[in-house]
Image (cartoon, grey):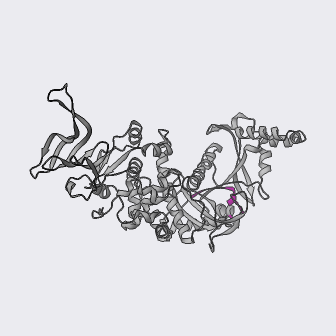
């Protein structure tokens, strides 16, 4: 016969069970044992939840069966649900604590606060709903780390899900409202005004010396007024819109951007960009470093003696009619072996020589360069693949082949030493980095299935994310940490949210602590959500509703 044996039972004043454990016991006849019977444990019932007055039935939290009721008279078990009156007030079915990814979102938001980007966004987007959507998409763009996770799924599984009360996370997956908002010109103006104002607090000259370039944005948007047939910047002809980007030459951060028809790439592009920046941000751009696609008679005349006289312009010389590309090569050819004209930049050895030359009847400074490392490698690869063709060349043609893969010329209105002028042009590679970051890491492309307004909104959203990512990379470049590694490793730090709004953070491992220390951010053991929203995110004090 089975019975319930209870140990260390403690009841509250109202008769409910506070603590105690129990087991199912059986009695067996044993002639060798005193009393002729022996008790043995058949099964542990575990913690006592409730027990009737007779001690013959009750509810138990069994280590093997879970929450069950047991009746020793009938020797039967019954599964208990959370609505059962026998467990009322026991808190066994309290709301579970939410367990989410904490480390990457918290660290990135703290970094954005330190860099001033949160203040910029709060200034540009004063309405809480707008601001929360901007932050949601910023976090998703930067921290998804190249994955295909949607914005709503990313936010729903992270610490960010605790922060935004004004928007349902499910609406972030296909957020037409957000991209339409960002597509309005007022949003672009508001952001860049706030950003330039912030940057000028530490550098009054921010935005006055800039690189300007454009990149193609092939797309399949119907009735897009900026689409045009173009082949510049890609391998084949396609329908394109072009993104013109203006970068501050010291920091490499975007100062402004505009969208133009794909087939427009001339002085008018620069002039309209300058007018936009001057009128909108009160910035007078006085230094331009341009790709060969901008080179034209009108451009050179404008900067040499026209409306843009007094501004500095440097452009790569195209190898086409009207430009003394080969003439300057022959002028410099005999000097290319002279060590006097060599210098080293970025691990490569360069030949560099300044000449004065006539371009469209105007005097210009020409800087002839040969990247000797690229020239040697290119020439070698060419000969390995075309040796018969090479042997059939004249000596003059062979000499050209030995340098052609590293040969280029810069035209400028400014006189400098060749090595200093090359440094100016190398700064232009920052704009290529921005384009590459936006296109590959942040998925600026493709632009299919978007309206003209939402295309503009997506571009502004990606430009903001690009600025944040460039700031993060710049900070991490010193210690040599990749952003992908930082994001991936800090995602291992988890947190739980309690009913009272307190977030409890797990103990971080050594790698997470090291990454936080590099960005001078302390890992909290806990934090108050309301205080974090008000103090860090600058949301209103009454936003906490969850």
Which of the image's four quarters has the N terminus?
top left
Q: Which residues are magenta?
A: 286-298
Q: Image quarter for residue 363?
A: bottom right
- Quarter location, residue 347: top right
Residue at x-position 65% and y-position 44%: 418
User: Which of 499/384 is in front?
Assistant: 499
Query: In the rendered view, would you say 45 is above or below 229?
Result: above
Q: Residue furthest top?
A: 32
- Above or below, 10 against 226 in this view is above
Q: Is residue 546 above or below residue 525?
A: below
Quadrant showing the C terminus: bottom left
| Residue 382 in view in this figure | yes
Answer with the quarter of the image where residue 350 lies: top right
Along the viewing direction, whichever of 384 and 137 lies nearer the viewer = 137
- Horizontally, residue 44 falls left or right of residue 158, namely left
Q: Is residue 296 left or right of residue 126?
A: right
Image position, residue 118 (x, y; %): 39, 57
In the displayed image of the protein, which residue is found farthest to the right? 392
Residue at x-position 56% and y-position 55% = 438
Q: Residue at x 18, y 49 (%)?
A: 50
- Of the pair 287 and 522, the residue shown nearer to us: 522
Q: Is residue 326 magenta?
A: no
- Tell whether position 294 is magenta: yes
Q: Position of residue 6 (x, y in %)?
A: 17, 40
Instruction: Point out residue 233 in the picture as x, y percentages from the top left corner.
Output: 68, 58
From where the camera sits, is residue 206 visible? no
- The x, y position of residue 534, in whole percent, is 30, 58
Between residues 338 and 234, which one lies in front from this camera angle? Answer: 234
- The extreme left residue here reads 13
């Amino acid at each position: 016969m089975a019975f319930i044996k209870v140990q260390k039972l403690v009841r509250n004043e109202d008769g409910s069970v506070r603590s105690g454990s129990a087991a199912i016991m059986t009695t067996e006849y044993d002639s060798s044992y005193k009393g002729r019977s022996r008790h043995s444990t058949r099964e542990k019932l575990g913690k006592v939840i409730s027990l009737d007055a007779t001690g013959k039935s009750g509810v138990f939290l069994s280590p093997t069966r879970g929450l069950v009721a047991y009746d020793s008279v009938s020797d039967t078990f019954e599964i208990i649900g959370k609505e059962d009156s026998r467990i009322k007030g026991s808190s066994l079915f309290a709301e579970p604590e939410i367990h989410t990814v904490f480390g990457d979102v918290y660290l990135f938001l703290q970094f954005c606060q330190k860099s001033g980007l949160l203040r910029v966004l709060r200034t540009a987007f004063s309405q809480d709903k707008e601001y929360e959507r901007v932050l949601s998409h910023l976090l998703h763009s930067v921290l998804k780390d190249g994955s295909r996770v949607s914005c709503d799924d990313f936010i729903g599984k992270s610490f960010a899900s605790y922060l935004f009360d004004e928007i349902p996370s499910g609406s972030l997956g296909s957020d037409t409202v957000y991209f339409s908002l960002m597509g309005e010109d007022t949003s672009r103006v508001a952001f860049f005004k706030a950003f330039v104002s912030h940057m000028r607090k530490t550098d009054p000259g921010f935005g006055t010396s800039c690189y300007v370039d454009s990149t193609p944005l092939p797309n399949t948007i119907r009735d897009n007024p900026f689409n045009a047939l173009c082949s510049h910047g890609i391998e084949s002809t396609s329908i394109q819109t072009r993104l013109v980007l203006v970068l501050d030459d010291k920091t490499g951060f975007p100062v402004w951007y505009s969208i133009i028809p794909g087939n427009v790439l001339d002085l008018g592009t620069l002039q309209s960009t300058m007018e936009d920046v001057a009128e909108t941000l009160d910035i007078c751009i006085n230094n331009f470093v341009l790709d060969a696609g901008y080179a034209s008679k009108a451009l050179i005349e404008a900067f040499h003696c026209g409306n843009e006289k007094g501004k500095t312009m440097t452009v790569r010389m195209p190898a086409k009619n009207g430009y003394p590309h080969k003439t300057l090569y022959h002028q410099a050819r005999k000097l290319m072996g002279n060590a006097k004209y060599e210098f080293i930049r970025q691990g490569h050895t360069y030949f560099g020589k300044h000449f004065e030359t006539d371009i469209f009847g105007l005097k210009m400074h020409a800087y002839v360069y040969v990247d000797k490392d690229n020239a040697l490698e290119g020439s070698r690869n060419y000969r390995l693949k075309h040796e018969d063709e090479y042997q059939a060349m004249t000596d003059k043609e062979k000499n050209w082949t030995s340098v052609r893969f590293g040969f280029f010329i810069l035209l400028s209105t400014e006189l400098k030493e060749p090595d200093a002028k090359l440094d100016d042009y190398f700064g232009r590679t920052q704009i290529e980095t921005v384009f590459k970051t936006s296109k590959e890491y942040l998925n600026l492309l493709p632009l299919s299935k978007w309206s003209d307004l939402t295309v503009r909104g997506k571009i502004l959203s990606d430009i903001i994310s690009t600025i944040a990512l460039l700031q993060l990379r710049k900070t991490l470049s010193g210690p040599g940490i990749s952003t992908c590694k930082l994001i991936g490793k800090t995602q291992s730090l988890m947190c739980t949210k309690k009913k009272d709004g307190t977030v409890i953070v797990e103990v971080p491992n050594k790698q997470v602590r090291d990454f936080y220390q590099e960005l001078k951010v302390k890992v909290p053991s806990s934090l108050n959500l309301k205080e974090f929203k008000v103090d860090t995110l600058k949301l209103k004090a009454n936003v906490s509703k969850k």
